[in-house]
Image (spheres, helix red, strand yellow):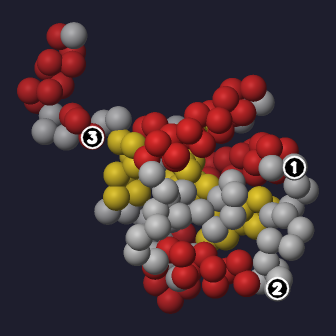
């Protein structure tokens, strides 16, 4: 308790330590289902398909090409491992992995992130329509999931990660 009291008194951002920065946004720890020393994965406020999640470096960096080599490696290793878990959970053998690097590429949050989207037969009439849908949904206002819906999904995914003994 003393350490907590000391932190409260000396660190003006203490209350945010259980939060993750995602560009200008704060992501509650309860919505994060996996993390490494450099990256974290969290459920999506506006999923395009069931299981659509995001993985991002912990350091806020808008441009993929400006990531440190170890950050890029960690990000993609995390996506690889989590992609396998998502594919098993959603009973599919296909996954779309998307990165939008910069506003002209459709990036709506100025923080590098990968979209992991488990795919199902017929989820889009034209397979590539998913890219426009990601951009459309990202820019939409309203219709967001509730915090409790997101927390429930994060708990399920945390358990799947635990059961899969995801280490690296």
Query: Mark 1 — residue?
Result: 91
Query: Mark 3 — residue?
Result: 16
Name which of mark 3 and mark 2 comes first in the sequence: 3
The local secondary structure at tag 3 comes to helix
Decide: is 26 above or below 117.
above
Between disc 3 and disc 2, the foreground one is: 2
The image's mark for residue 126 is 2
Q: Residue at x 32, y 62 (%)?
A: 24
Of 62 and 128, which appears nearest the observer? 128
The single residue placed furthest to the top in the displayed view is 1
From mark 1 to mark 3, how far is it between C-alphas? 36 Å
Of 168 and 154, which appears nearest the observer? 154
Decide: is 39 above or below 168.
below
Decide: is 154 above or below 104.
above
Q: Is residue 39 visible?
A: no
Q: Residue at x 49, y 56 (%)?
A: 145
The single residue placed furthest to the left in the displayed view is 9
Decide: is 135 above or below 73.
below
* Disc 1 + disc 3, Cβ < 8 Å: no
Of 92 and 64, which appears nearest the observer? 92
Q: Residue at x 69, y 33 (%)?
A: 161
The local secondary structure at tag 1 comes to loop
* Left or right: 128 as drawn, with respect to 78: right
């Amino acid at each position: 308790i003393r350490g907590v009291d000391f932190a409260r008194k000396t660190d003006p951002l203490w209350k945010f330590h259980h939060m993750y920065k995602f560009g200008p946004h704060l992501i509650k720890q309860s919505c994060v289902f996996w993390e490494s020393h450099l990256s974290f994965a969290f459920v999506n406020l506006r999923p395009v398909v069931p299981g659509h999640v995001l993985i991002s470096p912990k350091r806020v960096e808008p441009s993929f090409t400006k990531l440190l080599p170890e950050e890029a490696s960690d990000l993609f290793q995390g996506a690889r491992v989590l992609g396998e878990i998502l594919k098993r959970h959603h009973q599919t053998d296909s996954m779309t992995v998307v990165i939008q690097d910069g506003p002209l590429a459709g990036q709506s949050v100025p923080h590098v992130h990968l979209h992991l989207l488990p795919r199902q037969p017929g989820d889009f009439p034209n397979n590539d329509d998913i890219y426009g849908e990601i951009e459309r949904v990202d820019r939409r206002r309203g219709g967001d999931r509730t915090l409790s819906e997101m927390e429930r999904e994060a708990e399920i995914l945390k358990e799947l990660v635990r059961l899969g003994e995801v280490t690296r």
